[in-house]
């Protein structure tokens, strides 16, 4: 059927290319998917990115698609996708990397799953993650840590480390993660790919296991901006099943106008202290200089409320998590202790056995923050501070188009390095959390790497709702070669 | 403030109120009669097979989200408008966190510091105004069922919409409390807000009871009596609780704040949990639901289609139909009855007057309702419709009005109509019950009666005028009750007088 060369590079094709060739029947979906699984089965054991390969179901679906013509709306016809294991899909494990949900299988399809399948996509596997999406290193997982495809001794970032590593390793051109405080952008930065967190509410949360409901956003990984655009055209829809979803749809702006020339970009320069890694700063300034050459204006900005970022985030996210995770009680599904004598013990033992250390830490923190007598001092003040942060961003955006900063203070740290000190791990999210607090769209772009070093992520924020403009800016940067995925480069 | 409240059923309380004021506030949880649940698409139905009306949201499967059912909001707004609450343009849902097997999410979605309605009131018969503090929206829990040593949970009820109606502590006797509760109940039922079935838990009341020295402006420590599901038991539970608290205070003790249950068999309240064991519910705004915004247009739309309140309807019946207050109240106590009555009035307009129809309804129809309910083993309030065909009633009353049948025959036909379900016209035809009104037939029968009863006629002429009734009765007997009574009377009188003159 095809002369396509299944060389090692076959897995580097992006979704746009694959869909086009599958739609025109120039490539065989079945052949591609089965080759892909051979590759994954060989490479995944050392990466530990994917947790439950769905080979049979994927091949079955590939056959179905192959034997009929693609319909016009099936813009991801035959394209393989990886799903973070905290998103519901009927029959797929939804384990959230927790002993608590061992053996639990999806009972319904998340809105994102239905939309993507309706667009012709094939879900090939679930991905590893930090337990219940809490963590920035992917070491807090009952499946064990994920390795960074660029260097196995390093973390892929978290919490969506499995999805990021899978996309960077070529297991799929697209992967879904969830971003509550940077859980997609940080791993994208560490793995040298693109990670896009849309405006809060742009993508339906229905079917995403909640961590911090007011911060959570399902977010895609890709190795090209056109792939992010394609998946946003499918997922950026209002959803009646999610009361917090936006009432407008994503309307692509890719290549419609020049997003470099004449745009004004704000840089919170005072945040770029010596806590930021030297290599990151160099890459940061290099992109800035090149953008100036293309006619982009840069201004320094101050966002004074950002000093509250970490405290506000950890109070709100933990408080919401403490309530969201109450449903894991051993009554209806998931782990149930064998030790209980009464109802109280059933709850406490089940949860003691089922949850990992980081999850317990945050449940305790959140429960405390909501307790009678402490609410006003913690949760109430954090809510008020969040409002200030939202207002200040809105004000700052009155005179600029985008904000520019690194995604993380460093490139991927060594596995085992951060998990010893939770504060160190929390500090890692300092550049990503504000977007979640202020509900802004933000994207992590891979800086081109000339040396043998690990990938570096550079980040842009846009005003609420300007998801398409942000992707259009990233598209122009990618087109000019100013940012570039490092997937497959230096793979060891 | 501290007028003496006379408690008819609880004489001991009269004694207590010489020294103390009884302070009672009521919280009612009322299930909304919406088609689906408050935050999910599952059916809201009672009595279906366990766990048949469930979905990811009301089962709290990981990742499922709540979405507000607008029908529930409309029903709650209806309640708020009916009792004169101020509808809040912006209200906020909150999470109330606690663990229990019937609470699948580990929290209940409710409202906390920003409920849908503030204020409003109901007026009792003694003109006392009971203020309503707030009305809030929330969701019901499932049901734990204990079978031997096993515990099972049915989530059919989990997520059903509720309104919680909280009164101010304005009631001062058990009777006032039960009257308030009955009145609230008639509102929710008449306004189609709830099925209001107490046995099924559609309408559940908690009472806060405390005592304070007569005239004092400081409230005493209160106890809450939970989930009393009958008007009578609520009264009794409060009366018991007042006596209990009185005894403690009189013996120099003090009341500790606690939640109590009521045992109707023993007629006493018992401690469920004390304040020290009170739960910390860790309320916080529900992040899955944006604030609920109510527009003026929506409020006006609900107001314009607000079903008539029982009181308003009673006044209208007095005004429009010129009914005595008693009749209007009796008929308007039930929405089913008053609706039926109004249909009768409108279909028989120009034929029968409303007062006549009210008498007919309150005797014949209501008796039939009672008998029907008795055979079904339920109370007449529980019937969804009047078990008498409106069409048959109308034709019966028309037959009576146009003189085809007599009133007496009418009663007979009504009974037959109920038991056989046949139409009055058919019954009249089958039994040949058409009233005899023609002069010749009446004349012949009268003549026969007078000829056959000459001695009585003589007595009559001697002055025993009471015997007139006897002659009429004989005539009716011969005719099988079919003679037109007016004409018969007239004719009989004429013929007796002509005989007297002849004699």
Image (cartoon, rainbow, N blue to C red):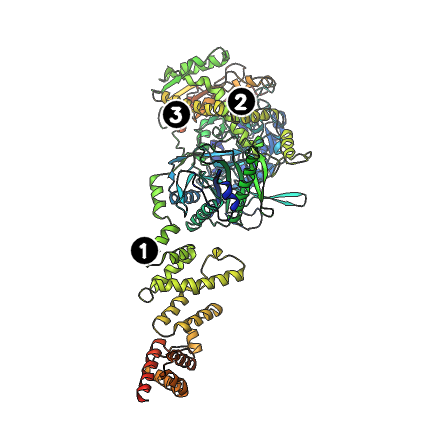
User: Which quadrant is the N terminus of chain B positioned in?
Assistant: top left
Residue that mark 2 sits on: A191
CA gap, disc 1 to disc 3? 63 Å
Mark number displayed over residue A463: 3
Q: Distance between the residues labelled 3 and 2?
A: 26 Å
Farthest residue in the bottom direction? Answer: B503
Q: Do the numbered discs 1 and 3 sit on residues whose CB atoms are within 8 Å?
A: no
Q: Which element is circle 2 on?
A: helix
Is residue A409 left or right of A300 when viewed as pictured?
Answer: right
- Structural distance between the alpha carbons of marks 2 and 1: 82 Å
Relative to the observer, which residue lies in front, A396 or A406? A396
Residue A398 in picture, x, y percent from top left? 34, 22
Which SS class for mark 3?
loop
Residue B414 pos. (x, y %): 44, 69
Query: Which residue sits at x=48%, y=22%?
Result: A377
- Whether tag 2 and tag 1 are in contact, CB under 8 A, the answer is no
Q: Which one is in front, B268 or B333?
A: B268
Q: Which of marks 2 and 1 is in front?
A: 1
The crowd level at tag 2 (other Cα within 10 Å; few <14, some 14-19, many 20+) is many
The residue depicted at 48 percent of the width and 61 percent of the height is: B370
Q: Position of residue B275 (x, y in %)?
A: 56, 32
Residue at the image position 58 percent from the left and 39 percent from the top: A57
**Front one among B349 and A254:** B349
- Closer to the chain start, of discs 3 and 2, is 2
Is circle 1 on the same chain as circle 3?
A: no
- Residue carrying label 1: B319
**Foreground: A381 or B136?**
B136
Looking at the picture, how far across and down is residue A385, in whole percent? Answer: 44, 22
Placement of A83 over or under B402, stated as above or below: above
Same subunit, tags 3 and 2 = yes
């Amino acid at each position: 059927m095809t002369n396509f060369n299944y060389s090692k590079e076959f897995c580097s094709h992006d979704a746009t290319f694959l869909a086009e060739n599958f739609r025109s029947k120039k490539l065989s979906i079945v052949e591609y998917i089965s080759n892909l699984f051979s590759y994954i089965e060989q490479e995944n054991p050392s990466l530990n990115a994917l947790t439950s390969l769905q080979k049979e179901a994927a091949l079955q679906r590939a056959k179905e698609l192959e034997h009929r013509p693609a319909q016009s709306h099936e813009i991801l016809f035959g394209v393989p996708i990886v799903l973070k294991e905290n998103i519901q899909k009927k029959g797929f494990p939804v384990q959230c990397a927790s002993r608590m949900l061992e053996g639990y299988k999806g009972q319904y399809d998340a809105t994102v799953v239905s939309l993507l399948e309706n667009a012709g996509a094939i879900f090939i596997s679930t991905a590893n993650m930090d337990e219940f999406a809490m963590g920035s290193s992917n070491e807090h997982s009952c499946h064990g840590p994920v390795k960074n495809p660029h260097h196995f001794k390093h973390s892929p970032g978290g919490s969506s480390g499995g999805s990021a590593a899978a996309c960077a390793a070529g297991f799929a051109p697209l992967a879904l993660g969830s971003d509550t405080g940077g859980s997609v952008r940080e791993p994208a930065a560490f793995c040298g790919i693109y990670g896009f967190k849309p405006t809060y509410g742009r993508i339906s949360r229905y079917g995403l296991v909640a961590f911090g409901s007011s911060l959570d956003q399902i977010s895609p990984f890709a190795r090209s901006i056109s792939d992010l655009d394609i998946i946003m055209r499918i997922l950026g829809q209002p959803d009646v099943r999610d009361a917090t979803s936006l009432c407008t749809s994503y309307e692509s702006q890719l290549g419609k106008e020049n997003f470099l020339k004449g745009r004004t970009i704000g840089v919170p320069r005072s945040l770029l202290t010596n806590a930021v890694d030297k290599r990151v700063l160099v890459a940061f300034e290099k992109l800035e200089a090149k953008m100036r050459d293309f006619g982009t204006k840069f201004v320094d900005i101050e966002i004074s409320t950002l000093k509250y970022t970490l405290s506000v985030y950890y109070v709100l996210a933990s408080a919401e998590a403490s309530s969201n995770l109450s449903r894991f009680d051993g009554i209806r599904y998931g782990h149930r202790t064998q030790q209980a004598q009464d109802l109280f013990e059933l709850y406490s033992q089940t949860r003691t056995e089922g949850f990992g250390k980081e999850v317990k830490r945050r449940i305790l923190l959140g429960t405390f923050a909501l307790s009678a007598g402490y609410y006003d001092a913690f949760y109430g003040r954090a809510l008020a501070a969040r409002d200030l942060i939202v207002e200040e961003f809105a004000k700052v955006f009155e005179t600029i188009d985008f904000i520019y900063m690194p995604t993380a203070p460093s490139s991927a740290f060594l596995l085992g390095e951060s998990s010893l000190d939770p504060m160190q791990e929390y500090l890692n999210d300092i550049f990503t959390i504000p977007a979640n607090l202020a509900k802004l769209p933000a994207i992590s772009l891979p800086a081109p790497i000339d040396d043998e070093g690990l990938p570096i992520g550079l980040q842009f924020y846009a005003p609420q709702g300007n998801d398409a403009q942000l992707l259009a800016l990233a598209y122009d940067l990618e087109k000019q070669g100013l940012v570039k995925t490092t997937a497959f480069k230096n793979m060891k | 403030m501290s007028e003496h409240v006379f408690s008819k059923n609880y004489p001991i309380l009269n004694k207590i109120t010489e020294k103390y004021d009884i302070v009672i506030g009521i919280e009612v949880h009322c299930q909304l009669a919406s088609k689906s649940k408050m935050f999910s698409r599952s059916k809201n139905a009672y009595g279906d097979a366990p766990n048949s009306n469930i979905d990811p949201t009301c089962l709290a499967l990981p990742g499922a989200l709540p979405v507000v059912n607008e029908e529930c909001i409309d029903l709650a707004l209806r309640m708020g408008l009916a009792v004169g609450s101020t509808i809040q343009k912006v209200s906020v849902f909150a999470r109330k966190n606690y663990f229990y097997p019937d609470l699948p999410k580990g929290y209940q979605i409710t409202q906390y510091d920003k409920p849908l309605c503030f204020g409003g009131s109901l007026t009792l018969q003694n003109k006392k105004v009971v203020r309503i503090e707030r009305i809030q929206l929330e969701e019901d829990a499932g049901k734990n069922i204990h079978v031997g040593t096993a515990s099972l949970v049915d989530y059919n009820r989990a997520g059903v919409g509720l309104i919680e109606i909280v009164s101010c502590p304005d009631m001062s006797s058990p009777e006032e409390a039960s009257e308030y509760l009955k009145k609230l109940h008639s509102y929710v039922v008449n306004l189609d807000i709830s099925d209001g079935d107490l046995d099924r838990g559609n309408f559940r009341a908690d009472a806060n009871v405390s005592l304070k020295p007569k005239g004092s402006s400081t409230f005493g420590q209160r106890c809450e009596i939970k989930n009393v599901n009958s008007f009578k038991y609520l009264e009794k539970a409060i009366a018991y609780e007042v006596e209990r608290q009185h005894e403690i205070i009189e013996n120099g003790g003090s009341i500790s704040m606690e939640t109590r249950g009521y045992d109707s068999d023993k007629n006493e309240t018992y401690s469920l949990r004390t304040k020290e064991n009170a739960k910390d519910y860790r309320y916080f705004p529900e992040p899955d639901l944006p604030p609920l915004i109510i527009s003026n247009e929506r409020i006006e739309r609900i107001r314009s289609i607000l079903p008539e309140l029982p009181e308003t309807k009673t006044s209208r019946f007095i005004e429009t139909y010129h009914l005595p207050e008693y009749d209007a109240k009796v008929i308007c106590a039930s929405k089913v009855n008053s609706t039926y009555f109004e249909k009768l009035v409108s279909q028989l307009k120009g034929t029968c007057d409303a007062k006549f129809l009210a008498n007919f309804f309150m005797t014949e129809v209501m008796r039939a309702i009672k008998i029907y309910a008795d055979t079904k083993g339920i109370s007449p309030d529980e019937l969804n419709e009047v078990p008498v065909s409106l069409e048959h009633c109308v034709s019966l009353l028309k037959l009576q009005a146009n003189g085809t049948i007599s009133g007496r025959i009418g009663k007979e036909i009504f009974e037959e109509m109920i038991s056989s379900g046949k139409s009055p016209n058919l019954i009249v035809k089958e039994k040949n019950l058409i009233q005899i009104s023609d002069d010749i037939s009446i004349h012949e029968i009268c003549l026969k009666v007078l000829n056959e009863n000459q001695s009585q006629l003589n007595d009559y002429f001697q002055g025993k005028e009471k015997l007139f009734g006897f002659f009429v009765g004989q005539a009716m007997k011969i005719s099988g009750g079919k003679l037109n009574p007016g004409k018969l009377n007239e004719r009989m009188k004429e013929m007796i007088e002509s005989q007297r003159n002849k004699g």
